[in-house]
Amino acid sequence: MKFKIFSLSESVHYSKKIAGECNLQLGKMNTQIFSDGEINVVFDETIRGEIVVLVAQVQLPYHNLFELFVAIDAARRASAKEIICVVPYLPHSRQERKDDTRSAISSRLIADFIEHAGADRVITLDMHSTAIMGFYKIPIDHLSMHNIYIDHIKKEFDLSKVCLCSPDFGGLKRIKAYKAVLNCDMAVIHKERMSPNQINSMEVIGDVSGKDVVIVDDMVDTGGTLVKASEILKSQGARSVNAYCTHGVLSGDALKKIENSSLDTLYISDTVSHSDLPSKIKLVSSVELVSKAIQFIISGKSLQELG
Ligand code: R5P
């Protein structure tokens, strides 16, 4: 099983850990940014005939995303045999349909860019909507923090006191999958937004009084959903409110908002990188999961046991 792992410029910490799990050193790749902002990626070692794994935490700003397209193109032109892109968090995933008459479907556009640049396969985690897979013709290996978070919840909480909660109806299927394993109570919040990133109203459906509420969501972005949800859940008697979100996008003043909120603990994975997190936010690593997936894929082994 021979392959090389390369990191995009803002994913080095995460990529090194993945390479370590695979008993490899990171390959040598260099990204230059010119004075006008243009990006150039150069592989500083041969990749001719090799399986190349590109690890790309492509949280915005956009140069991270563009660096991925350029790196794929460079790998293709340097005669890599296969290009596997690890994109743990796929940006634009909430723009997977037309909500307005004359708007774009930019999630599809990202898929087109990745595919047309020359990627052979994408590994990602907890997509906002699995329908996004249909935007790609290349294989998408869709991993989930589900099993890791289940084990974590079992260790952290007394399950007889836990009430799982979805912060919107879109997450109902996800929360039911957690309930099927954990066998505890569940609630759902009816959330209405007046505009993107702005919540209008929330209504809790279910009894949360005296419970340790555990919200599960695919991502936390501005933190608006979690802050408002924790307020309303506490006002309805919840003993504690905690959340497990795969992608800690944490844009704008989300860190401050969460730190000052009534949310007790937020667990996020490391699909998006952050240099500093407040004490209320704890990291649960996806490195082992992603590393196993890479090795299984390259050795032709089923990913089913990874969940
Ligand atoms: C929405 O459908 C998503 O699952 C998240 O609940 C949402 O994107 C979180 O965004 P924010 O943190 O900005 O409320």
Image: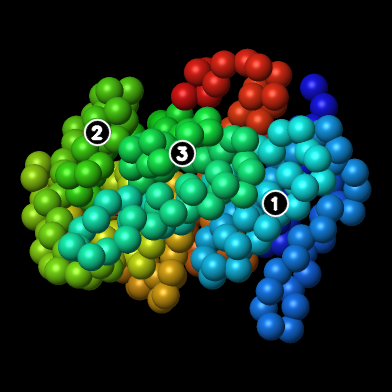
User: Of residues 59 and 49, which is closer to you in this image?
Assistant: 49
| Residues marked 3 and 1 touching at CB (< 8 Å) | no
| Residue wearing tag 3 | 136
Residue 53 image-quadrant placement: top right
| Residue wearing tag 2 | 173
User: What is the C-alpha distance between the residues marked 2 and 3?
Assistant: 23 Å
Q: Amino acid at mark 3?
A: Tyr
First in sequence: mark 2 or mark 3? 3
First in sequence: mark 3 or mark 1? 1
Please name the colour scheme applied to the rendered image.
Answer: rainbow
Q: Is residue 166 left or right of residue 63?
A: left
Q: Amino acid at mark 1?
A: Asp
Residue 292, position as x, y percentages in the image: 65, 28
Q: Residue at x 13, y 60 (%)?
A: 192
Q: Residue at x 20, y 70 (%)?
A: 195
| Residue wearing tag 1 | 73
